[in-house]
């Protein structure tokens, strides 16, 4: 009489495992596969008509002919890259009507490995602002919306230096708590004003310290409020840090790169590393 062998629990688990259907997830880096919208937001390409596609072949040449270029280093499979794409494209379209010398471009970092590596792209998306082909020291950390992107670009391109002509205006700056640079000039336009404006555009926002605001004046009474001798040789320049209630006086050459280096070195708190040592007035 034949006997039936009773399967062991281990055998039952094996049979159940073999009978279970498998689903292989597609490779997100594959260009021919589109993941469900529930995972990755859909990219609306209609808004990207004014976004320039850059590759290794045209990257340098394009940046050579456009003074201001914003570049989005993205990955097609990245959730946040896809989230940014339509807003970035909308910002590019909006800028067309401004008549400014600024272009928005994008680089597929998964294809252009050397470009991404050359600009230290370590995450997606990484948005950099280039001036004369040189990237700013800090990438864009703002919200991924059209308005936030436009505000950031406007700050980079807008009025770089504000004129201070009255004591009331100067007092508001002093009591605002901001990091401020004030230059006492002979004129509110000309070579020295241009150098100050260029220095302000070399300044940038980072995640630790706010952007420094630049001001210029020819008013002796304004200069006095900043403890600048109105009779001093012009141009004179000081940096105010309200957190330390003191001024740092610039004594270098009145050229944009040197001024920007001075500001970067002296706007940080004194308990952190600062390579620049300038004259200080502690009685402010």
Image: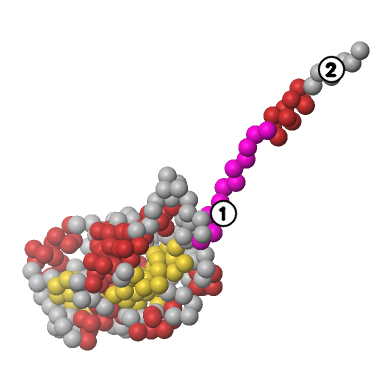
Decide: few, some or many residues near mark 2? Use Cα within 10 Å; few <14, some 14-19, many ≥20: few
Instruction: Identify residue for label 1.
Output: 27
Location of residue 52 (image quadrant): bottom left
Q: Nearer the viewer, mark 1 or mark 2?
A: 2
Q: Quadrant of residue 194?
A: bottom left
Q: Determine the image quadrant of residue 158.
A: bottom left
**Residue 155 or residue 263, whichever sits in front:** 155
The alpha-carbon separation of the residues under discs 1 and 2 comes to 46 Å
Position above or below: 67 against 159: below
Q: Nearer the viewer, residue 67 or 265?
A: 67
Which residue is pictured at 23% across the width and 76% down the height?
Answer: 100
Residue 172 vs 25, above or below: the answer is: below
Would residue 20 be counted in the magenta stretch?
Answer: yes
> Is any atom of residue 189 visible in this view?
yes
Mark earlier in primary sequence (1, 2): 2
Please provide percent x and percent y for residue 240. Answer: 25, 65
Element type at marker 2?
loop
In the picture, which quadrant includes the C terminus?
A: bottom left
Query: What segment is highlighted magenta in the picture?
Result: 19-31
Question: Residue 197 lies in magenta, yes or no?
Answer: no
243 sits left or right of 63 in the view: left
Q: Residue at x 49, y 77 (%)?
A: 56
- Mark 1 neighbour density, 10 Å: few (under 14) some (14–19) many (20 or more): few
Q: Specify the label residue 4 is tagged with.
A: 2
Mark 1 in CB contact with mark 2 (< 8 angstroms): no
Q: Is residue 17 above or below residue 4?
A: below
- Location of residue 198 in the rendering, given as x and y in whole percent from the top left corner: 28, 78
- Overall secondary structure of the magenta stretch? loop
């Amino acid at each position: 009489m034949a006997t039936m062998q009773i399967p062991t629990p281990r055998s039952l688990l094996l049979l159940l495992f073999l009978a279970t259907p498998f689903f292989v997830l597609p490779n997100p880096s594959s260009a021919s596969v589109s993941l469900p919208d529930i995972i990755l937001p859909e990219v609306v390409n209609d808004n990207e008509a004014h976004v320039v596609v850059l590759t290794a072949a045209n990257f340098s040449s394009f940046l050579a002919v456009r003074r201001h270029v914003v570049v989005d280093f993205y990955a097609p499979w990245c959730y946040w890259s896809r989230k940014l794409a339509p807003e970035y494209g909308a910002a590019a379209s909006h800028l067309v009507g401004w008549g400014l010398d600024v272009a928005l471009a994008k680089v597929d970092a998964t294809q252009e490995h050397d470009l991404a590596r050359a600009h230290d792209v370590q995450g997606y998306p990484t948005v950099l602002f280039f001036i004369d082909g040189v990237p700013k020291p800090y990438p864009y950390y703002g919200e991924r919306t059209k308005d936030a992107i436009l505000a950031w670009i406007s700050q980079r391109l807008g009025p770089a230096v504000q004129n201070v002509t009255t004591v009331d205006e100067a007092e508001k700056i002093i009591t605002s708590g901001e990091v401020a640079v004030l230059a006492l000039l002979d004129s509110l336009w000309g070579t020295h004003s241009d150098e100050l404006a260029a220095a302000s555009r070399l300044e940038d926002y980072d995640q630790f310290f706010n952007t420094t605001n630049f001001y210029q004046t020819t008013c002796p009474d304004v200069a006095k409020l900043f403890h600048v001798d109105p009779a001093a040789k012009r141009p004179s320049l000081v940096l105010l840090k309200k957190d330390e209630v003191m001024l740092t006086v610039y004594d270098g050459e009145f050229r944009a790169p040197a001024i920007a280096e001075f500001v970067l070195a002296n706007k940080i708190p004194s308990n952190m590393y600062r390579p620049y040592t300038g004259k200080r007035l502690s009685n402010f």
